[in-house]
Image: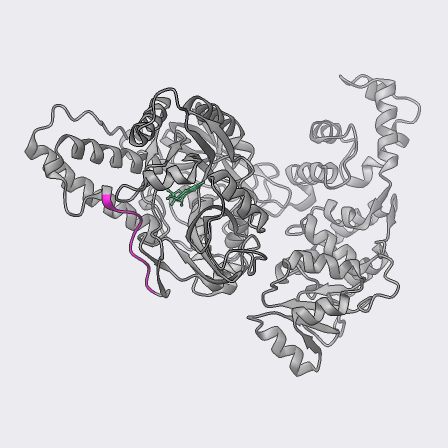
Amino acid sequence: MTVLTDVDGLDEAAAAAELADLAAALGQANHAYHTNDSPDITDAEYDALKRRNAAIEARFPHLKREDSPSEKVGAPVAEGFGKVTHAVAMLSLSNAFDDTDINEFDGRVRKYLGLGSDVAVNYTAEPKIDGLSLSLRYEKGRLVQAATRGDGAVGENVTANALTIADVPAKLERAPELLEVRGEVYMSHADFEALNRRQLEAGAKTFANPRNAAAGSLRQLDSDITKSRPLRFFAYAWGALSDPLADTQMGAIERLRALGLSTNPLTSLCAGPAELVAHYRTIEEQRATLGYDIDGVVYKVDDLALQERLGFRSTTPRWAIAHKFPAELAWTRLESIDVQVGRTGALSPVARLMPVTVGGVTVSNATLHNEDYIAGSDSKGQTIRDGKDIRVGDWVQVYRAGDVIPKVADVDLKKRPPDAVPYVFPETCPECDSLAVREPGDAVRRCTGGLICPAQAVEKLKHFVSRAAFDIEGLGAKQVEQFYADTWIKEPADIFFLRQRFGSGLQQLKNREGWGEKSANNLFDAIDEKRTISLSRLIFSLGIRHVGEAASNMIARHYGSWERFDAAMQSVGESGSSAWEDLIGIDGVGGVMAQSLTQAFAQQAERASIDRLVAELSIQPVERPTTAGSPVAGKTVVFTGTLEKMTRAEAKARAERLGAKVSGSVSSKTDLVIAGPGAGSKAKKAAELGVDVIDEDSWLALIASK
Ligand code: IVH
C-alpha cells in the first residue's frame, strides 16, 4: 500500500473527508490489534495511515477531529478482566523512519532545551521489542499488581498471569518502597514455533506471529493457560516510584537489572544522532539472529532531569522516539508448489517463488503450512485471509520475521491469472506413492509408507546424524543423502557396518568425489567413536515423533538404562502392566508423546531396525549424581502451583542434583509434593493419597544443607 504524505494538492473539503476515513480505518485497526489480538493490517500500513493523518492535520490544524487518531493510544480494555487505572499513564512513542527524522528529533530536543549546537545530548538506544507492554507494581518489593496498557489510562489486571512468567520476579530485594516496572512481554521465535506446533496438534487456533501469541497468552482469563505458554519480559521503563532509580536512563536500566529484572543486552549509550544511527545499523544486522521479534530501535534522552524538563505531548514523550525498521514484507509470484515429506511422514507444502528481497534477504521458498492453509482455512475450519485460497501463478505476499521460516501470508486476487486453478493437495506420497492420510483432528497429511518411503528414511537418517543426536564428524546431511542413494546406508545400523562393508578395498568410496583413503578412514574412526553413546542421545536419535531433546533427557533419566527403558517399551501394552502409568508420569511426557513412543516400539519393522542398531552400540547408563546424605535421594517429588523463590526449571534441576526424581503427576509412587500458591488438583490428589505436601519454604529448608 502506498499512502502519500504529500498533502499540497488537497483542498479543505477533501481533507475533512479523508480525516474522517482515516479516523474510521485507524479505529478499526486499533480494535483488531488491541482488543482481538488479530491485526487486520500490517504495522507498516498502520504507520503509513498515521503519517498521512498527521500530515493532513499539520496542514489543516482547524480540521483536526475530536476523535483524532493522533490523540489515541491503544484501545479500550477487553471485558472479563478487572480494570486498573495506571498511576502514571502508559504512553506510546512517536515514530521515525529514516536518518533525517533522527537528526530532526535531536534538533527538536536541543531546541526545546535551549541548547546551542555545540552541546551534544546523550541518548540511550535499545531494541524496540515487538510484544505488548506490561506494568508491574511492586510494593515493599512484592509484586502486587500487573496491568496491560489498555488505552494508556486504564489497563487490564493480569496479575495472576504475569506471575507465571519466569522473567517476572514475585519479589525484589532492596527495591524502592513503591516501584512500577514497565516493559515488554514477548515470545521467542523458538517458543512461538513450538506453541503453534502444539496448538496444531491439539486442533487449536494457531497464531499469526509471536506478538499475537504473546498477547493472546497473557490475556487469558485462566492463568493456567498463560503458565503453559513460555512468555518472557524485558524491563525498559518505569511508572510510579517512591525514590528515583538513578540520574540517567542508563543508570536506571542498570538498577532494574541489579534488582533482578531482565533488561535488553543491546542497550547502549550514544553521544548524538550519528552514534544512534550507527547503533541502529548494528542492531538491524543482528535482527535475524536475536531469536525474538523487534521492529525498530528506541532512542531516549539519557539525562533524567532533561527528560523531566522535556515532558510529554498528548500521547508521546518529547524525550524519546522509535526508529522503525522497514517492514519485512514483499509481493512476488508463486511459481509452483512442491510437497516435501518429513521424517515423520508429514507432507509439507512449500511455495517456490520468484526470488524477492524481504528485509535484506533473498527469499525463493516459503512455507504454506498445510492443505487447509492453502485452501484458506485454519485447523478449526475457520476462514483465514477472508477465505482466499492460494493458487500457482498467484501474486502472493511473503512475510519474514527474524529467522522464522518465511511464509506466504496473503494473495492479491486482482492479479490472479484467469487460468489459475485451485490447488489440489496430493492424497498419495509424492516420494513413494503410499497413501497419505489425515488423522481426525490433525491438520497434517502423512505418508503411510513408513520406512519404505525413501524421503522418510533419508530424513530419519539425517536426524540420526544431526548435532544433538549421533553427531558423527564427516557424516552430515549431504553424505547421508549420497550414501542412501548408493544404497550403502538404508537405516541407522548400516552406518556402523560401513568400515566392514568397504574392508580394505576402499576403491568404491574413493571413486566418489571428495573421498580419499584418509578421509574414509577418518570417517570410520569417527563412526566407531560414537559406538559408545548416552541413553538420552540414543532415544533422541531414533527420531520418534514428538520425542525431542528435552523429553529424551527426561526419559533417559527416568529409566536410567537401555535395558530398563526397553523392558518398559516391551511391557507397556501388556494388560496389568504399570508401564504406561509410569511413562506418562514422567515430567514432560504427555499422552501424545507416550502414545507415539509406544507405537514406534510396537511396529515390527521399526523395532527390528532399532534392535539391529542397538546391537552395534554400547549404551551408557545415566550416571546418578552422588547424593550421599541427601534427604531426597531416590524420592519422587512433584512441584505444583507457583514457585516464588526460583523458577520451576531451577527447582527441578536442584532436586535432581540431589538425587530426587521429579514427576509431573501425583500417584501412589509420589513421596513428596511441593505446593506453591495456586496449587490445585495435584495438591488435592496428594492429600487424598496421603502423600506429604509442603510449601516452598519448607522444601528449601529441607534441602538447605545440600
Ligand atoms: S519506552 C513513554 N522502550 O513500544 C514511552 N517502549 O510504540 C515508554 N516498546 O508502548 C515506552 N520496546 O509497548 C519503550 N525499548 C522500549 C520498547 C518499547 C517496545 C513498545 C511499548 C510502547 C510501544 C510504543
The answer to whether residue 72 is magenta is yes
Q: Nearer the viewer, residue 368 or 559?
A: 559
> Which x, y percent locates residue 164?
54, 60
Magenta segment, which residues? Answer: 71-79
Q: Is residue 602 visible?
A: no
Q: For the point 72% across and 64% down, which residue is it?
A: 662
**In the rendered view, does 257 fall on the left or right side of 239?**
right
User: Which of the four quarters of the rendered structure image does ligand 1 lie in?
Assistant: top left
Name the foreground residue: 659 vs 272. 272
Q: Nearer the viewer, residue 352 or 235?
A: 235
Q: Can residue 376 be seen in this view?
A: yes
Quadrant location of residue 476?
top right
Position of 361 relative to 651 (above/below): above
Most common secondary structure along the magenta stretch: loop
Q: Is residue 706 left or right of residue 178?
A: right
Which corner quadrant of the image does residue 116 belong to? top left
Q: Can you give x and y, in whole percent of width and height, for residue 51 in the image?
A: 25, 33
Q: Which colour scheme is used?
A: one colour
Q: Looking at the picture, how far across and down is residue 437, in whole percent?
A: 54, 50
The answer to if 248 sits in the magenta stretch is no
